[in-house]
Image: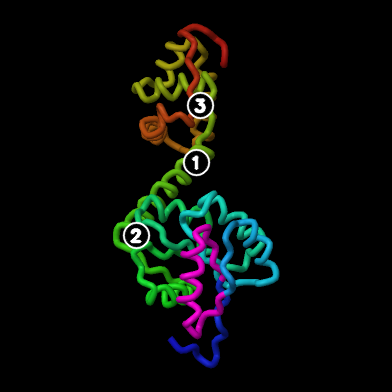
Amino acid sequence: MPVASSERRLKVLILSEVRILGEGLARALGCNDILSISDPCGDLDDALAKIPDLQPDIILLDASLSGGSDSVGLILGVAPQAKVVVFAVAETPTNIVAWAEAGVAGYIPRTTTLDDVAPLLVAIMRDEQPCSARVAAGMLRRLCRTGNSNRDRRDARSLPTLTVRETQVIELICAGLSNKDIARRLRIGLGTTKSHVHNLLGKLNMQRRTQAVFWMREHQGRPSTSWSKAPPAGDRSGV
């Protein structure tokens, strides 16, 4: 693959504890005139020491390296501008998602031929990553779960906290009781009952009792909602 006149060669550092693999890959990629290959590193400490001087664009990380995905954060700590690309990785959704969460910019499956490595690296530098349909589906499932989790946390933060008396009142509203019936059931004054209903609707940002009924049906029993055990009828605590 000839390098375009407007492009500079991509500087690549290979990190593999398997010497024959690192040296063999370096020799194969060195024949490509779009890549500039440094001497491969045999361990993480060696790579971390050389990276500041070499300033590689891409760090090719052997998937079998000791420390695994934890190495990615250490590498990015000294070379935040570089793209870490894991190679010889099993292309399964679980594997790829784990490496992506560790911070890699791309990956090269272990089934990839030598001729395809350089084009893949160029694509990854352009923020492009070919992947199997199974991996794409796995990524979508992961994003969906993350999105649902974040939405649940936002919903939990937005749910108001009801007092013991407000919990009693909304439960009785849902049971179809009028203000007079609620006052009689809780043995409190009608004015006090109206005040509780008014405050409750205000806290829930609602105007009608029916809205509170629908809210109760949707949120009751959710762990994030503060439902307190109501005292027995006639107990005036929380009035």
Determine which residue is flagged by label 1. 153
Q: Is residue 36 above or below residue 47?
A: below
Q: For the residue carrying disc 2, how many other residues have a C-alpha within 10 Å: few (<14), some (14-19), or many (20+)?
A: some
Query: Which residue occupies 48% across, 64% down?
Result: 20
Where does residue 216 sit, x and y in percent of width and height? 40, 30
Residue sticking out furthest to the bottom: 5
- The answer to which image quadrant residue 87 occupies is bottom left
Query: Which residue occupies 51% across, 66% down?
Result: 60
Amino acid at circle 1: Arg
Q: Which one is closest to the eye, mark 1 or mark 3?
A: 1
Disc ID at residue 136: 2
Identify the image quadrant of the N terminus.
bottom left
Amino acid at circle 3: Ser
Determine which residue is flagged by label 3. 226
Q: What residue range appears in magenta?
A: 13-37
Q: Earlier in the sequence, mark 3 or mark 2?
A: 2
Q: Which one is closest to the eye, mark 1 or mark 2?
A: 2
Q: Can residue 75 be found in the magenta stretch?
A: no
Query: Could you give the CA–CA distance between mark 1 and mark 2, rounded to whole angstroms?
Result: 26 Å
Query: Could you give the CA–CA distance between mark 1 and mark 3, rounded to whole angstroms?
Result: 15 Å
Compare residues 45 and 162 and report the one nearer the observer: 45
- Direction from residue 71 to residue 148 in the image, left or right: left
